[in-house]
Amino acid sequence: MIRTLRSAARVFALLAALTAGMVFPAGAMADETTATAPKVDLVIDVSGSMRAKDIDGRSRMAAAKQAFNEVLDATPEEVQLGIRTLGADYPGDDRRTGCKDTAQLYPVGPLDRTEAKAAVATLAPTGWTPIGPALLKAAEDLDGGEGSKRIVLISDGEDTCAPLDPCEVAREIAAKGIGLTIDTLGLVPNTKMRQQLSCIAEATGGTFTSVEHTDELADKVNQLVDRAADPVAVPQAVEGAVTCEKAPVLKSGLYTDREEFGQQRWYRVNVPDGHELRASVSVAADRAVDPSYGLLLRAVTERGREIVRGEAAGNGRTDVISTGLRHPSADREDEDGALPPEPVCLQVTHSFSPAAGVKSSPGLPLEVTIDVVPGPDESSDVASFGLGRGWWLLGALILAGFLAGLVWGWLSRWRIAVWRTN
């Protein structure tokens, strides 16, 4: 009996090894789990107004320090975290000097919790509120790498360094296409500060939260840091052309671009025979625009013949508008055999117009998704969005279950036979 159970155990171990070999070939798991570490830069307002004692009976600075210590304890190991200050060093009245007062308190990189907490303990409310300059420097702190990048701005007042509008700074950062998100938290916010921090966040697809209690601040910052560690698809920056002939060639993936008001953007996609092109585009109004607008996505041939189009319209009740299209490519052959992939030109046009007094540059952010997949008659191991690997896994599990069932049935019959003979 014991010998038989040992044999069965060996069979199950062999099945597990075979299944693992089919699903996870050598080196595949390591390749898929290796990724560039996400980066987060916490930007803290240390201006004189942080002395106010209106958060749970304590000063705003004390509440921020406590929240930071809790966040540092809870930061995931894979996150590279840094801390930047604004208004921490210059107590004087010279505006030019005060608007340069931003410094890196702790560099973005692997986190030494003890060292970071010691740096936070030295903070004392001091000077001005140069939010715009601090955001520009924070973007430099996060430069490089392919992982997600996030700035978490914590402030108790609006910027004091106009005309450098921090909202315009956020739009310029977003226009660089580096996949950087800015989240903002307002301590005991007033209307003007709420509008400014909301605008900063919206420009990069981030969030704004008003905070009036210490535990709320710690919880929200922790959520944002944890979110940075979540795997995300980082869009690739691309610059569309004004004509199809000069358009960049896109492969399957996620892309980000900017489109000026009244402008068209062109992209090219090569679609092999028997494959299908699936394309979508979204445009976000990251500033005040006139109501009533539309979005058009056209697929045309190199000679300008329209193949298919997608359209969407808005009336000012949402700040994002999206549309998409699908185009199957038929099998094409000439005397020499199969033809090269069919070039398809994609044209993106929107009818947004800026509200009075709103800057038109940089253009509105747009996001393009391209997916070229085998058609229904095309046999391939890889389907759209990685489903091919999912089918391999399902098949391997079915096979393993079938073999395991045979072994278990054989063992059950053997045990019954032994019991009857005894």
Image (cartoon, rainbow, N blue to C red):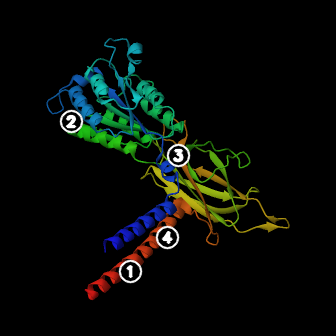
Relative to the observer, which residue lies in front, 8 or 318? 8
Kindly state the secondary structure of the residue where label 3 is placed: loop
User: What residue is at 35 percent from the left and 68 percent from the top?
Assistant: 6
- Give the mark nearer the N terminus: 4 vs 3: 3
User: What residue is at 22 percent from the left and 28 percent from the top?
Assistant: 60
Q: Which residue is mark 2?
A: 214
- Give the mark nearer the N terminus: 1 vs 3: 3
Q: Quadrant of residue 106?
A: top left
Mark 1: give few (<14), some (14-19) or many (20+) Cα within 10 Å: few
Relative to the observer, which residue lies in front, 17 or 46? 17
Quote the CA–CA distance across marks 2 and 3. 35 Å
Q: Which residue is mark 1?
A: 410
Q: Nearer the viewer, mark 4 or mark 1?
A: 1
Query: In the drawing, does residue 220 fall left or right of residue 30?
Result: left
Kindly state the secondary structure of the residue where label 2 is placed: helix
User: What residue is at 49 percent from the left and 34 percent from the top?
Assistant: 173
Classify 145 as above or below 23: above
| Three-letter code for the amino acid on which mark 3 is drawn | Pro
Mark 3: give few (<14), some (14-19) or many (20+) Cα within 10 Å: some
Quote the CA–CA distance across marks 4 and 1. 23 Å
Q: Are the residues at dot 2 and dot 1 in contact (C-beta closer than 8 Å)?
A: no
| Three-letter code for the amino acid on which mark 1 is drawn | Trp
Kindly state the secondary structure of the residue where label 1 is placed: helix
Q: Which residue is mark 4?
A: 395
Query: In the drawing, does residue 209 fall left or right of residue 215?
Result: right
| Three-letter code for the amino acid on which mark 4 is drawn | Gly
Q: Position of residue 18 (x, y in %)?
A: 48, 64
Mark 4: give few (<14), some (14-19) or many (20+) Cα within 10 Å: some
Classify 2 as above or below 53: below
